[in-house]
Amino acid sequence: MIGQLEDLLTQLEQLREQAIAELASITTSAQLDEWDTRYLGRNRGELKNLSAVMPKLSKEERPVVGQKINAVKSTLEQELKAKREELKQREMLQTLEQERIDVTLPGRALPAGHMHPLSRTIQDVSAIFMKMGFQIVQGPEIETDYYNFQALNVPEDHPARDMQDTFWVSPGEILLRTQTSPMQIRTMKQQQPPVRVLVPGKVYRNENIDVSHEAMFHQIEGLLIDEHCTMADLKGVLERFAHEMFGPERRLRFRGSYFPFTEPSAEVDISCASCNGTGCRVCKYTGWLEILGSGMVHPKVLREVGYDPAKYRGFAFGMGVERIAMLQYNVNDIRLFSGNDLRFLRQF
Ligand code: 2NL
């Protein structure tokens, strides 16, 4: 029996040496897992196999072999733990090496977009009037007949009220606003004078589409109400606007006109920038370009919003944003603004 015992102890010692020798050549976690199963595996591990003889040993032999098994097991477990740590460090270094980035490389530029030309024009016009104390307000595009027509003194038989010219949501009642003035009516009903507002926004008219007409376009309307407001104030404000917008050398011309909501009314032209007023193709040989419509707010409109026409006066004006942008950027077809052709848009 003694011979057998020594044999067993030698086998255990050899197992230890073999396992440690193999460990040295292991380079991956997967190989290490295999090693773990082969030597320390609870099911068919080499150490477990050698332990199987234990029940056959004598009472005296058992603790000797048991101690040796425990010693080998504990050594191998320690070695395993150390190797795991070593591999982890090595794999980390490898990852760091592989995923190395050059932080000094130039970045990839994201393609930057820019503002739509109509938004630019709205912003330019708004900035000029804001400097003169106007507040920018916006309102609903779906309106009632009352705010769009009745409150603005547009008579029952006015061509604008024709069922053909307006987009009705429910005929005679709800509509797509044909101008931004309904928002000015709402503003006046909400506050007492003085009022200085500028209302940019989309408006809708049932037009035959051509180079200068679209069914949806943009308008900017302005309104000022105060005591002692005269036509001279209207002219001064609009001249200041035209000079800031189109240049100080532009001259202005006020032509008598008619709108139901203003009295008197005037259309405003600026001298043509292409020919300086001498006549060319741009101004159709007139020397002048129409930029907006304007007038003194009709007393009926003032009374309708609850203002006393004997105490308060006001002026109002309206301009088509597309028309202004066409003059500003020399564009010859209104449809380009809503066409979203990038070859057009990228020019701005
Ligand atoms: C044009 C003419 C205009 C107005 C709009 C207005 C608004 C109120 C009262 C009185 Cl609340 N008037 N707006 C006045 C005159 C002309 O627009 O040709 N627009 C493109």
Image: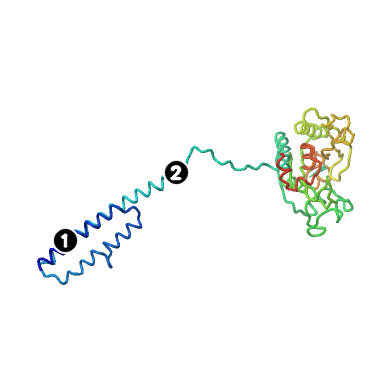
The type of colouring in the image is rainbow
Q: Is residue 312 visible?
A: no
- Residue 144 point in image, percent of width and height: 78, 54
- Residue 17 point in image, percent of width and height: 21, 56
Mark 2 CB near ligand 1 (8 Å cut): no
Which image quadrant is residue 278 in?
top right
Residue at the image position 31 percent from the left and 54 percent from the top: 26
Residue on which disc 1 sits = 10
Question: Foreground residue, 245 or 51?
Answer: 51
- Residue 33 point in image, percent of width and height: 33, 59
Q: Is residue 231 visible?
A: yes
Nearer-N-terminus badge (1/2): 1
Which amino acid lies under the numbered mark 2 shown in the image of this protein? Arg
- Left or right: residue 84 compared with residue 138: left
Cα–Cα span, label 1 and label 2 = 50 Å
Question: Foreground residue, 306 or 270?
Answer: 270
Quadrant, the N terminus = bottom left
Ligand 1 falls in which quarter?
Answer: top right
Q: Which mark is residue 100?
A: 2
Q: Residue furthest top?
A: 249
- Left or right: residue 194 compared with residue 31: right
Question: Considering only vertical position in the picture, is 80 above or below 121?
Answer: below
Question: Considering only vertical position in the picture, is 297 above or below 82?
Answer: above
Residue at the image position 15 percent from the left and 72 percent from the top: 56
- Residue 163 point in image, percent of width and height: 85, 56
Which amino acid lies under the numbered mark 1 shown in the image of this protein? Thr
- Left or right: residue 36 compared with residue 244: left
> What is the total number of numbered labels drawn onto the structure image?
2
